[in-house]
Amino acid sequence: DRIEKADKKGSGDVDGEDYFEVTYEGYGPGGVAVMVKCLTDNRNRTVSEIRHGFSKHGGNLGADGSVGYMFKMVGLISYPVGIDEDTVMEAALDAGAEDVVTNEDASIDVLTDPANFSTVNAALQAAGLESEMAEITMRADLSSSLEVADAEKMIKLLDTLEDLDDVQNVYSNADISDEVLAQLD
């Protein structure tokens, strides 16, 4: 019976199942803000799994609104190293993008209002610019730099949360420098 029920659940053949979108907020190692978006049919099971993931890796689950104010929904279109910055900037700003950010590694991120995301993305594609990634995501206003010990715990926390079945997306304001990442390898 359990196998049949699991098979039906996996294929979506179960009638009467209600799924809920739930967002959990918490703090990771070093006070890093973490938001976890889930889609679940059992809120109690999901919160228990999320709480366990946080506590196992040096974090804790927070109350609603504890870190949510630090994040905002944005459209993000990323371009690889070597693309012409002026071309991207001109096309993006003409299409209504909010900002064009050149990262330390010379890759470029175009930020848009979620309502204008598809318009800006289409305009950039029409200009012949192929993005590496284009999505609507949550982005933190401020980042939190981590040292080696906290960075290692944070990476484990993020991996644990992302591996949970009900988790759709995990967002954090962790800033782990290349030097710290090199020490972790």
Image (tube, rainbow, N blue to C red):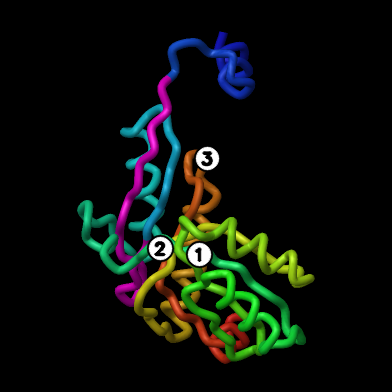
Give the quadrant of the C terminus.
Answer: bottom right
To which residue does mark 1 refer? 156
Whether pointer 1 and pointer 2 mark residues with C-beta atoms closer than 8 Å, the reply is: yes
Measured as percent of width and height from the top left, residue 182 is found at 62, 87
Q: Is 30 one of the magenta-colored residues?
A: yes
Q: CA distance from mark 2 to mark 3?
A: 18 Å
Q: Residues within 10 Å of mark 2 (few under 14, many from 20)?
A: some
**Which three-letter amino acid code belongs to the residue tagged 1?**
Lys
Which amino acid does the dot numbered 2 rest on? Answer: His
Residue annotated with mark 3: 165
Horizontally, residue 48 falls left or right of residue 131, namely: left
Q: Element under label 3?
A: loop
Query: Which one is earlier in the sequence, the residue at label 2 or at label 3?
Result: 2
For the point 38% across and 29% down, the residue is 42
Q: Earlier in the sequence, mark 1 or mark 3?
A: 1
Residue drawn at (39%, 43%) of the image: 49
| Camera-side residue of 99 and 49 | 99
In the rendered view, does 183 fall on the left or right side of 20? right
Is the Cβ of the residue at disc 1 closer than 8 Å to that at disc 3? no
Task: Say if the magenta span includes residue 156.
Answer: no
Name the image quarter holding the N terminus. top right
> Which numbered circle lies on residue 57?
2
Which label lies toward us, 1 or 3? 3
Say the numbered circle drawn on residue 128. Answer: none
Alpha carbon separation for disc pair 1 and 3: 16 Å
Where are the magenta residues, as a range? 18-34
Q: Residues within 10 Å of mark 3 (few under 14, many from 20)?
A: few
The location of residue 33, given as percent across then percent down, is: 33, 68
The answer to whether residue 157 of the structure is visible from this angle is no
Q: Earlier in the sequence, mark 1 or mark 2?
A: 2
